[in-house]
Image (cartoon, rainbow, N blue to C red):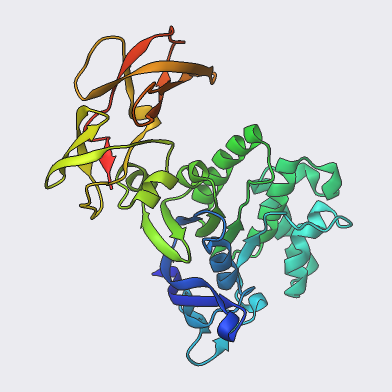
Amino acid sequence: MNELSVNELHLDYGSGAHANPILKGVSMHLQKGEVVALLGPSGSGKTTLLRAVAGLESPKLGTIDIGDRRVFEGERGFEMPAEQRNLGLVFQSYALWPHKTVFDNVAYGLKLRKMGAADIAERVNEVLKQLGLGHLGERFPHQLSGGQQQRVAIARALVYNPPVILLDEPLSNLDAKLREEARAFLRELIVRLGLSALMVTHDQAEAMAISDRILLLNNGRIEQQGTPQSMYETPDTLFTAEFMGSNNRLPGRIVQRNGSRVQLDVNGATLQATARGASTSAEGATIIRVEEVRVSATPVENAIELPLLTCMYLGDRFECLFKSESGPEISLRAHSRYKLEPGRYWLQLPADKLWVF
């Protein structure tokens, strides 16, 4: 059974002629024990969708069900208050009370539910221990690191065993190194506790690392959904392909197309490529992931020859930029284990990884 079901949800800001549609018929579900990431650029509607599920935004049409409870139905004007939805919510800012200890921050929701003091202490201490915070119960938020504050916010959301936990950009306040550690911790915690989680992020690497399924939103609609692997390796649209990875874009002209096999002319060079999506125009958009470009000092098949412009050291590899000197501008990035010497190189573009939309 689905822990969360959203059906044909519409939400506008403003009213009448000045209404600004934010969600335009979004449908999704979240199964028990599943982590779904809402991914998309700013303004795509992902945070609005999360807040609508939480009861913090009022949709216009559609339905929202949590388990077998209907919490919103636009047609009959029914909207269950946020506090009755029993959802765990972790805000981007953590929203901890500065004057309350860690224990009291986590216990707050249980006190509102009129739970007995002994039961509250047992439940809070249990969840703090699960999150590695057992020794910090008497500290105040300002005495904690960013990573510890984040875990307190998660503990507060988990303490009353909600059916679904909602995470709004939960790692965005952490620095880069801590984010990677927190990403692994959060995924491990969610799996270990068997949580059902809906997470908003604009970071595709974060979405791929933590979630079982990604819903990519674009301008208030779901552009594509699927496993992180399928979204990255088999995008259906140019928007998905460009959002889900680091890409090169090539000025190519379609010379011939046979099913998914495409022959391209790129600045006089003939290349074989693969058609994705429904595009059949002669000026299809051509892209290839940066990591799929292979650099060769000698001529190879399905390649274009370009001079090296510069190499940047990234720790585990060099990222090298190649740029044409004449004709239509062609700029390609590729990875190399070594710093390349100045000169001209053949950049091999495997046909199954060179996508035309």
Please name the residue shown 45% across and 60% down the image: 218
Left or right, 131 with respect to 326, comes to right
Looking at the image, the residue that sits furthest to the front is 327
Q: Quadrant of residue 144?
A: top right
Q: Choose between 7 and 243: the one closer to the eye.
A: 243
Spot occupied by residue 248 in the image (x, y as percentages of width and height): 39, 34
**At 54% from the left edge and 90% from the top edge, which residue is drawn?**
77
Would you place residue 289 above or below residue 323 in this image? below
Tally of marks? 0
Viewer-side residue, 275 vs 162: 275
Viewer-nearest residue: 207 or 67: 207
Q: Position of residue 247 (x, y in %)?
A: 40, 36
Q: Is residue 255 left or right of residue 343?
A: left
The image quarter containing residue 304 is: top left
Pinpoint residue 298: horizontal percent, then vertical percent: 26, 9
Decide if residue 145 is in sight here: yes
- Name the residue at 85% across, 43% down: 143
* Residue extending farthest bottom: 76
In the picture provided, is 11 more to the left or to the right than 296?
Answer: right
Counting from the top left corner in percent of width and height, residue 146 is at 74, 42
Is 54 placed above or below 275 here? below
Seen at 80% across and 49% down, the residue is 137
Outermost left residue:
258
Q: Is residue 148 left or right of residue 171?
A: right
327 over 100 or under it: above or below: above
**Above or below: residue 224 compared with residue 11:** above
* The one of 161 and 292 positioned closer to us in this rendering: 292
| Residue 268, image quadrant | top left
